[in-house]
Image (cartoon, helix red, strand yellow):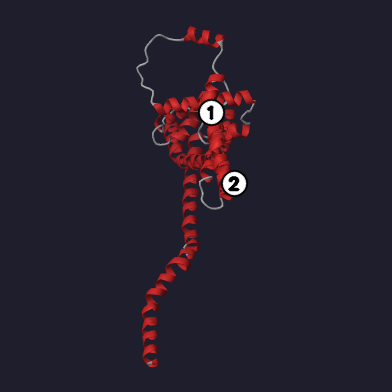
């Protein structure tokens, strides 16, 4: 049984290697594409040195894109939304995710075939984990990015308040704040830059802010967008509204920290019971037990 599984794993590996070698030949551009490339090709030498890692990534992404295109597989809107929530908005992000979804289970199956005992069981477990791993990794990246945006929101609002108090309009204050937070808060800076670009493209201000709320999916940012919408509709002074909102966010963050600190009293019970108390019992009762055991042996003699 183990020999059959090992031979099957070797066959799958050989098939994948042969596919990687043959696919670039089969998917090479036609004569018209080559003629177009010759027209747009530049004779200017490129002084930048491309590393082997970049060449490997580009080749892998090109293969994944060609395979996905020829098989008619499309990335769902939900997957594209998840990639955007994790910060991957470039054109190669769907191809990268598709390659991860294809190669990770194969690598996991190949690794599970080397288990000495219960090989079939471990192959199944490794394959399932490899299939779920890209989605779990993407969800974790999106969660961490949302947390970074949530933490950077109070400082950004303070900068907006300073810019608005200095006499700038909301759009100009947003642009100035985006330039200031590029180093410390790059995730929120990227989202605010997109808001500014959408406004320059002609979209209404409220629509761009609502798109920001839908993309980020951060409760504090959604409340901030709702506050801006109400201030724009009812004519509330924006500087005072921003100051009040920044104070509310800091108070909520303080309350959240206090809540986490209060939960530690309950969470510490489990390590106390299972790890610390047994060690204390051994240290305190161990010498007494040995003394009593020695006395009992003396009485027996």
Up the image or down, 205 lies above or below 256; here it is above
Residue 32 placement: quadrant? top right
- Position of the C terminus, as image quadrant, is bottom left
Q: Earlier in the sequence, mark 2 or mark 1?
A: 1
The residue that appears at 36% across and 86% down in the rendered structure is 294
User: Where residue 58 appears, x then y in whole percent?
Assistant: 47, 25
- Report the side of 295 relative to 92 (left or right): left
Please tell me whether mark 1 sits on a helix, a strand or a loop: helix
Outermost residue toward the left? 47
Q: Residues within 10 Å of mark 1 (few under 14, many from 20)?
A: few
Nearer mark to the viewer, of 2 and 1: 1
Kindly identify which numbered label has been placed on residue 124: 2
Per the model, the C-alpha gap separating discs 2 and 1 is 24 Å
> Which residue: 46% across, 42% down?
151
**Which residue does the numbered mark 1 point to in the structure image?**
18
Q: Position of residue 288 (x, y in %)?
A: 38, 82
The spot of residue 243 in percent (x, y) is 47, 40
Answer yes or no: is residue 139 visible.
Answer: no
SS state under label 2: helix
Relative vertical location of residue 190 with respect to residue 30 in this rendering, above or below: below
**Residue at (50% x, 49% y) in the render:** 252
Number of marks in picture: 2
């Amino acid at each position: 049984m183990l020999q059959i599984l090992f031979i099957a794993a070797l066959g799958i590996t050989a098939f994948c290697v042969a596919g990687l070698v043959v696919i670039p030949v089969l998917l090479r551009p036609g004569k018209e594409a080559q003629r177009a490339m010759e027209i747009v090709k530049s004779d200017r030498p490129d002084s930048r040195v491309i590393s082997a890692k970049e060449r490997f990534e580009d080749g892998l992404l090109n293969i994944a894109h060609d395979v996905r295109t020829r098989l008619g597989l499309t990335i769902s809107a939900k997957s594209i939304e998840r990639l955007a929530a994790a910060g991957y908005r470039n054109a190669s992000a769907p191809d990268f995710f598709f390659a991860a979804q294809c190669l990770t289970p194969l690598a996991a199956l190949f690794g599970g075939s080397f288990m000495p005992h219960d090989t079939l069981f471990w192959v199944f477990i490794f394959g399932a984990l490899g299939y779920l791993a890209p989605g779990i990794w993407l969800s974790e990246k999106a969660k961490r990015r949302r947390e970074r945006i949530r933490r950077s929101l109070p400082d950004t609002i303070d900068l907006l308040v300073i810019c608005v108090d200095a006499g700038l309009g909301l759009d100009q204050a947003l642009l100035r704040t985006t330039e200031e937070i590029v180093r410390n808060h790059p995730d929120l800076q990227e989202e605010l830059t997109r808001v500014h670009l959408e406004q320059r493209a002609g979209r209404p201000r409220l629509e761009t802010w609502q798109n920001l709320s839908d993309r980020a999916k951060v409760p504090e940012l959604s409340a901030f967008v709702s506050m801006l919408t109400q201030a724009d509709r009812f004519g509330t002074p924006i500087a005072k509204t921003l100051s009040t909102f920044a104070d509310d966010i800091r108070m909520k963050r303080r309350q959240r920290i206090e809540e986490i600190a209060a939960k530690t009293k309950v969470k510490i019970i489990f390590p106390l019971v299972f790890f610390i108390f047994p060690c204390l019992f051994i240290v305190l009762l161990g010498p007494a037990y040995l003394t009593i055991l020695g006395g009992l042996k003396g009485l027996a003699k």
